Image (cartoon, rainbow, N blue to C red):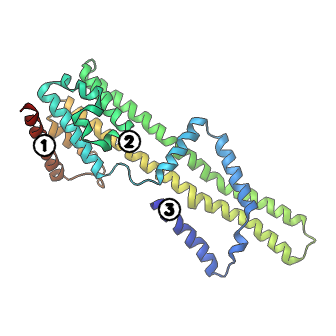
Amino acid sequence: MLVIIGYLVVIGTVFGGFVISGGNLASLFQPVELLIIGGAGVGAFIVGNNAKSLKATGKAVVRLFIGRRYNKAVYMDLMALLFLLLSKSRVNGLMSLEKDIEDPASSDIFSAYPRLLSDPSLINFVLDYFRLMISGSMNVHEIEALMDEEIETCEEELEVPANSLNTLGDAFPAFGIVAAVMGVVNALAAADRPAAELGMLIAHAMVGTFLGILIAYGFVLPLATLLRQKSSDQVKILQCIKVTLLSSLNGYAPQIAVEFGRKTIYNSERPSFDELENHVREVKSSASIKSRQEAA
């Protein structure tokens, strides 16, 4: 939604200012210039990216028009999920989590958090490292090194669409110049025409430079910046999981391990200490009631 609002502001201020200054919008409508700039940009984008990058960029751009993915509510769910898993493993041993990990959709713990289950990359990260913890074949330092490697790989993958759009945005002003030069060449070839017609041809040519710069800095490059911000959000939630699990492996109680994870969250999404403590207390209380009901 914010992307659309931003685009409307760009269009309104640029073209509105042009009209207020006495300009004629019809003179800016140059479909041939748009064809040259847009076609060259798309062609260069295809040449500069493989099929995997093109697909990833397309999916990433679609997600940009969706609201913030990892908000405070998602982090609260994540903290509660990790607390329940770590508490169960602390009381009954890590092997007690085997059924939950192998079939999360049927697990009472996981099924209570559908928002997390709907995110395969996030839930698989949690499942994979609990499997390693259950296996007991790796020490804390080895798991930490593996986590760092996976998070770094994820970061590199997420950077591909942003880099692709950034390169495309940088190219648009140059393609605008190409369109403008071609227009000037066309105007000079018609130098025998009346001055008014010649001036119109030159004005049309200059629209190419204008469009190239506007498309780059008003539309494409802001998307690359937004992609990097969303990528940072996705990496941050993986780091939160990493810190929480490593704290537990180092012997800290589940509530303390969750607190360590809370400290890694950005301020805009981070619940306060009291909020998290109350939430964990509620989760613990509801889990106790449920276990007593099952026992009865």
Q: Element type at marker 2?
A: helix
The amino acid sitting under disc 2 is Val
Residue indicated by mark 1: 286
Q: Earlier in the sequence, mark 3 or mark 1?
A: 3
Front in this rendered view, residue 284 or 217: 284
* x and y, in percent, of residue 2 in the image: 45, 61
- Identify the residue position indicated by label 2 in the image: 235
Q: Nearer the viewer, mark 2 or mark 1?
A: 1
Q: Quadrant of the N terminus?
A: bottom left
- Residue at image coords 13%, 46%: 282
Instruction: Give the residue type at disc 1.
Output: Ser
Q: Looking at the image, which residue is at 38% across and 42% down? A: 235
Q: Using residue 83 as the reference point, say whether residue 5 is left or right of it.
A: right
The percent position of residue 76, horizontal first and vertical second, equals: 24, 47
- Crowd around label 1: few <14 · some 14–19 · many ≥20 (10 Å): few
- Asked if residue 110 shows in the view, the reply is yes
Disc 3 versus disc 1: distance between alpha carbons?
Answer: 42 Å
Q: Secondary structure at mark 3?
A: helix
Q: Nearer the viewer, mark 3 or mark 2?
A: 3
Q: Position of residue 172 (x, y in %)?
A: 65, 55
Q: Nearer the viewer, residue 56 or 18?
A: 56
Question: Can I make out residue 251 in this image?
Answer: no
Cα separation, mark 3 vs mark 2, equals: 25 Å
Q: Position of residue 215 (x, y in %)?
A: 62, 59
Q: What's the residue type where badge 3 is placed?
A: Ile
Find disc 3 in the rendering and name its residue: 4
